[in-house]
Amino acid sequence: MSSDPEESRQPDPTDPWDEAVLEAVFAQSDVGLHVLDTDLRVVRVNTVAVGIRGISADRILGLPASEAYAPAGVSVDEDVLRKVLATGHPALDRLVTGRPPTDPHTKHVFSVSAHRLQDRRGTVLGVVVTSTDVTERERAHARLRLLHDVHERIGTSLDVERTARELVDVTVPGFADWVVVALTDAVLKGRAPGLLSRDPAPLLRCAATGRTGAAPPVPEAGAVLLPGIFGATLPSSASLLPPDGHGGAPGARLVTPLAVRGQIFGAVAFRRANGGESYGEEDIALAEGIASRTATCLENALRFTREHIVMTALRSWPLRQEQATQSAVDVALRHRPGGSAAGSWFDVIPLPGARVALVVGQVEQAGLSAVATMSRLRTAVHSLTTLDLDPHELLARLHATTLRLSAEQDTSTGAGSAPDSAGPPEGGDHPTASCTIAVHDPVDGRLDIARAGSSLFAVVRPDGSVDTKPVDDGPLLGAEGPPFACSTFSLPEGSTLCLASAAESGDAGPRTAEVVNALAHPDRTPEAMADAVKRLLAPDRVLLIARTRHLPPSELGQWAVPFDFSAVGTARAHVEERLRQWKHPVDPFTATLVVSELVTNAVRYGAAPIVLRLITDGDTLTCEVSDAGQAAPHLRHAKAVDEGGRGLLICATLADNWGVRHTDEGKTVWAELRPEGEGTAP
């Protein structure tokens, strides 16, 4: 044997071993071999290559490769082969498709490589092409790619019809030439499916369809599709059904229900065009995976729809009371939707004396539980405003309410602390909230503010100056607790207040410069300001813009009352005269009697100075008596033999509403009267 390495690498045609190796490769190898000459004509093929193609060797020998393999549906790239001949650089692992005559209904995929052939002297003899059937490998890769697309592209929105449309877009044409997705009536209307897997023939309506040009027509949107496309009864799992016999496309249908935990959301049917590859066991398993992902997305979409309906209903309660607050402020309200079902809210609450409370809040967690917490906090705010508390006192009570909600939540989950604990419960995900409350008095322009947490709050004065920090941030409700940041201003008429719920955690919210640019236009209406600021907010946040008003002198009467019982008659005279001037519909006798009792109580139990004030707000008359005493009056029922003690009982009986408001200077006892027959305002 020669020791020359170069010589050892060259086969000797006279060597019987070389001839045996070559013969074994051509006769026994699993790899198809195709030998082409320099003109790219077929010189020799091995047994495997002929078997794969299903074409006898006699029919292709001597033919150009492009012509020889055309019956198998193979397109030969002659440019690549000529480049291999010219350069000697092999072309490796190129994928070629074809339909061998032995299996014309199935598209096969081959991995093809080409190498140049030359003799010992370097003369180019031709090119040898190897081919391996990798159809199953490529099908497995295609299924993985499809499953990846299913998870990436189905469920991008929380809308059931769009989810059905996404299923069609993902599967046509890669998995099917014809797809029909049907959903139950309840799902299409945003309700729970209402059908269980044991229901044999649910009512399904067409929700989305798709097809290629070679596929037959699809049903119209809204058409009832069972029985018919999905069979007389809906299969409980992915199944192959025979042709429907109802004028539909020929060929088997692959049908699978869209179900989660036994509830049926709908069904999907797949078909391939005539002459296409039939569905196999792997396709059935793939269809089940596609349907499972789609059904889960439909369930998520329905859950969001229900939460959104609940959130909208809770947020819209109570109805805006524009008529009851228009004497104090002109408001514009906005909500920037975002789909997270966050617990943001705003309220414009009328208070006695033509005052108004502006409230904006945000429960920190998102979801339906946050919306429920938000609703309970709103209810608490409406209840607490009836106590005429200062904003910072109201927030302190609201903080206690939030702690009770935390304790109830922890108790329901088996954890927690006592409901009367002073701080937030240890452990768990207890609710917290931010809340800003501003109370505006249109009589003197006084504005009292208190804040829990951080949120957007700005004051725009009539000259265009913007104060973006009129009050400091405070601790969250349900967290550290009081004291809460508070402040008091005297605002000129035409000032604008901007309140927005807090941004999400980690989001600093709009930049101060952007807020100033949006608000520094006092000539704009509140509606225009609200539109400008809304664009700066994070999704699912609310905005309240309020322009302050002052009561005109013609709607206000105010007198200093001597600290003497003899002044009661003078107070009655003031009331009678002012009611005549106003031509007010309230009964004068009732009004003078109420004022008499309030002034008498102030002289008997209060302290000087005493001030009587009448406010007319439409048909409502508010009678207020202020004094410097801090003792709170209370309603009592006098005995039959008592000569006094019936003052507040008389006021409570005759007035539509009454109460006590404490200030730093003392207290104010007020009563609201309306004409007979109107009753208490809702």
Image: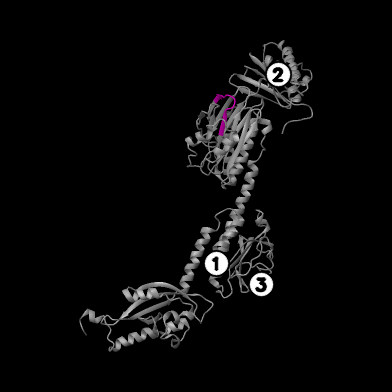
* Quadrant placement of the N terminus: bottom left
Occupied quadrant, residue 444: top right
User: Looking at the image, is mark 3 or mark 2 earlier in the sequence?
Assistant: 3
> In the rendered structure, which disc, 2 or 1, sits on the residue that comes first in sequence?
1
Query: Horizontal and vertical percent for residue 516?
Result: 50, 33
The residue that mark 1 highlights is 173
Relative image position of residue 668 (x, y in whole percent): 65, 21
The residue that mark 2 highlights is: 598
Q: State the SS at label 3.
A: loop
Query: What x and y, as percent, mark residue 651?
Result: 74, 22
Q: Is residue 373 visible?
A: yes
Q: Which residues are magenta?
A: 488-498
Going 51% across and 81% down the picture, which residue do you hit? 101
Q: Is residue 501 above or below residue 144?
A: above
343 sits to left or right of 66: right
Kindly identify the residue that appears in the image at 54 percent across and 70 percent down.
283
Measure the alpha-carbon separation of dots 2 and 1.
83 Å
Locate residue 99 relative to residue 274 in the image: left or right.
left
Disc 3 from disc 2: Cα separation? 86 Å
Cβ atoms at labels 3 and 1 below 8 Å apart: no
Residue identified by numbered label 3: 244
The question of residue 82 being in magenta is answered with: no
Looking at the image, residue 357 lies above or below residue 561: below
Mark 3 against mark 1, which lies toward the viewer?
A: 1
Instruction: Give the residue type at disc 1.
Output: Pro
Classed neighbour count for the residue bearing mark 3: other residues with Cα under 10 Å, few (<14), some (14–19), many (≥20): some
Label 2 neighbourhood size at 10 Å, few (<14), some (14-19), many (20+)? many
Q: How many marks?
A: 3
The correct choice, above or below, for 402 with respect to 548 in the image is below
In percent of width and height, residue 642 lies at 77, 17
Q: Amino acid at mark 2?
A: Leu
Residue 634 showing in the rendered view: no
